[in-house]
C-alpha cells in the first residue's frame, strides 16, 4: 500500500488497505501451455482465480482481496448471457460498503467490448479495472502477474475514482472508451489511438495524465443494460471491401435484426452495392451505423449530403465493435430513429 500523506497525489483513499473484488472470467491470463516456451499454443481460461492470486504474493500488501470465479472462457466466446451476469455482479458488489473497487481478469480478444459495455452500465464512481495477459500463466516472462498487481493497485487508488471503467495493461492505464487491441502477439497490444493512455502505473505508483470527457458510468442513460440475455437486441456487423455485395445485409434483414453496424472503408465509405442494401434495410426500420474498419480516426456525419437521406447514423470515433455495444444498449433502452441514435453516438 502507498503510505504517502493524504495531500500527496499518490496517496490512497483508504485508512486501511482497500477492499478489492477480483472477478475472474478466463482468458490467456488464466491460460496454460505444455511448456514455458509456448506463447501461442495453449488453452485459455483453465487456471482458477485462487491460483492467479497465489502467483502474486505482493497483492496482500496492496489490497484485501475478495475473489470470485465468474466464468472460465476464452473471450472469443464471450456471450450476451455472461455480459449480463458480469454487469449485474459488478453493480451488486459496488453497491455494498464492503467493496472499494473491482478488478476483472478477461481475455484480450474481446476485452475492449466488455470494458466499454461496463463503462456505460456501471452505476458507481468506484474504480472498475479490466486486465488481461498476452502470454499464458505458464510462459517465460508471463505478463499476467504484473498486470494483475498493477490493476489492483489502480483499483485501490483514489485517483481512479470517477474515471469510468479502466483497462490496465503493460503499465499503462487506458479508458474503456478509447482502448483497442492492436497486435496479435505483442505485450503492448492495448493502445488508445488518437488520444493516448490516461496514465500509468509502476511499482505501486499511479498517475493520471488526463481524464475522460464523454459521459460514463453514473452519468449515462443506460441503467444496468438489458436485464437478461434474451433482452439484448440483435445487432450484427458487416464489412465493406472491394467487390462487396448486399447478400449478407438482405439475409440479416430477413432474420429480423434490429441493427447493423457497417465497418466501412476509410471514412466509413461503403461499396455502392452494399450501401443500397443498407439503405433498404434502414428504410425498413433497421438501425444502420456507419463506422470504419481503419482502426483510428472518426467517421464524419455527412448530413443532408447522404447520411440523412439514406437514414444512416455515424459512429464518431467508436470502432465497429464498440459501436455495436452502444447501438445494442441504445436500442434496448428504447432508442429509435436515426436522429435519436445519432444523438447517442455524438454523446458517448
Ligand atoms: N483468446 C484469448 C482470449 O481472449 C486471448 C487472450 O486472452 O489474450 O481469451
Image: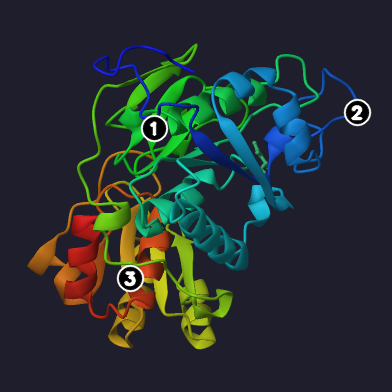
Q: Give how far across and how far down residue 28 sits, in percent.
A: 70, 36
Q: Please tell me whether mark 2 sits on a helix, a strand or a loop.
A: loop
Image quarter of residue 297: top left
Task: Answer yes or no: is residue 241 visible.
Answer: no
The x and y percentages for residue 181 are: 50, 36
Please rate how many residues cluster around mark 2, counting C-alpha atoms within 10 Å: few if below 14, some from 14 to 19, many from 20. Answer: few
- At horizontal 38% and vertical 49% (from top left) the residue drawn is 319
Mark 2 to mark 3: distance in Å? 44 Å
From the image, tell me which residue sits under label 2. Answer: 34
Q: Mark 2 or 1 closer to N-term? A: 2
Query: Which residue, as the protein is rendered here, is positioned at the far front?
Result: 15
Spatial CA distance of label 2 from label 1 is: 32 Å
Q: Does residue 16 lie above or below 338 as drawn?
A: above
Left or right of 50, for residue 300: left
Q: Is residue 278 visible in the rendered structure shown here?
A: yes
The colour scheme of the drawn protein is: rainbow
* Mark carried by residue 174: 1
* Pointer 1 local density, CA inside 10 Å: few below 14, some 14–19, many at least 20: many
- Which of the pair 327/267 is nearer the observer? 327
Q: Is residue 181 left or right of residue 41?
A: left
> Where's residue 49, x and y in %?
73, 39
Callout 1–callout 3 Cβ contact below 8 Å: no
Residue closer to the observer: 79 or 310: 79
Please name whichever residue, 66 or 145, is drawn nearer the observer in this view of the structure.
Answer: 66
Quarter of the image holding residue 328?
bottom left
Amino acid at each position: 500500500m502507498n503510505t504517502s500523506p493524504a495531500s500527496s497525489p499518490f496517496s490512497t483513499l483508504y485508512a486501511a488497505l482497500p477492499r478489492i473484488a477480483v472477478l475472474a472470467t478466463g482468458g490467456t491470463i488464466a491460460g496454460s501451455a505444455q511448456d514455458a516456451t509456448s506463447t501461442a499454443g495453449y488453452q485459455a481460461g483453465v487456471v482458477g482465480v485462487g491460483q492467479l492470486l497465489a502467483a502474486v504474493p505482493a497483492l496482500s500488501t496492496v489490497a484485501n482481496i475478495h475473489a470470485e470465479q465468474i466464468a472460465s472462457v476464452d473471450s472469443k466466446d464471450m456471450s450476451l448471457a455472461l455480459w449480463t451476469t458480469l454487469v449485474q455482479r459488478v453493480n451488486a458488489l459496488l453497491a455494498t460498503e464492503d467493496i472499494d473497487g473491482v478488478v476483472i481478469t478477461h481475455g484480450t480478444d474481446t476485452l475492449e467490448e466488455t470494458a466499454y459495455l461496463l463503462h456505460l452500465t456501471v452505476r458507481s464512481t468506484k474504480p472498475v479495472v479490466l486486465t488481461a495477459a498476452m502470454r499464458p500463466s505458464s510462459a517465460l516472462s508471463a505478463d499476467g502477474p504484473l498486470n494483475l498487481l498493477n490493476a489492483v493497485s489502480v483499483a485501490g487508488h483514489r485517483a481512479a475514482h470517477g474515471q469510468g471503467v479502466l483497462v490496465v495493461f503493460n503499465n499503462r492505464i487506458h479508458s474503456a472508451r478509447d482502448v483497442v487491441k492492436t497486435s496479435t502477439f505483442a505485450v503492448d497490444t492495448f493502445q488508445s489511438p488518437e488520444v493516448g493512455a490516461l496514465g500509468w502505473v509502476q511499482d505501486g505508483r499511479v498517475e493520471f495524465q488526463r481524464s475522460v470527457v464523454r459521459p460514463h458510468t453514473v452519468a449515462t442513460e443506460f441503467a444496468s443494460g438489458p436485464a437478461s440475455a434474451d433482452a439484448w437486441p440483435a445487432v450484427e456487423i458487416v464489412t465493406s471491401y472491394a467487390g462487396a455485395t448486399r447478400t449478407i445485409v438482405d439475409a440479416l434483414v430477413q432474420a429480423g435484426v434490429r441493427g447493423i453496424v457497417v465497418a466501412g472503408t476509410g471514412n466509413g465509405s461503403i461499396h455502392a452495392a452494399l450501401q443500397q442494401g443498407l439503405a433498404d434495410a434502414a428504410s425498413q426500420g433497421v438501425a444502420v451505423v456507419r463506422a470504419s474498419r481503419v482502426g483510428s480516426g472518426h467517421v464524419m456525419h455527412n448530413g443532408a449530403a447522404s447520411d440523412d437521406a439514406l437514414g444512416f447514423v455515424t459512429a464518431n470515433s467508436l470502432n465497429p465493435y464498440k459501436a455495436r455495444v452502444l447501438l445494442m444498449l441504445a436500442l434496448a433502452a428504447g432508442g429509435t430513429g436515426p436522429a435519436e441514435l445519432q444523438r447517442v453516438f455524438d454523446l458517448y
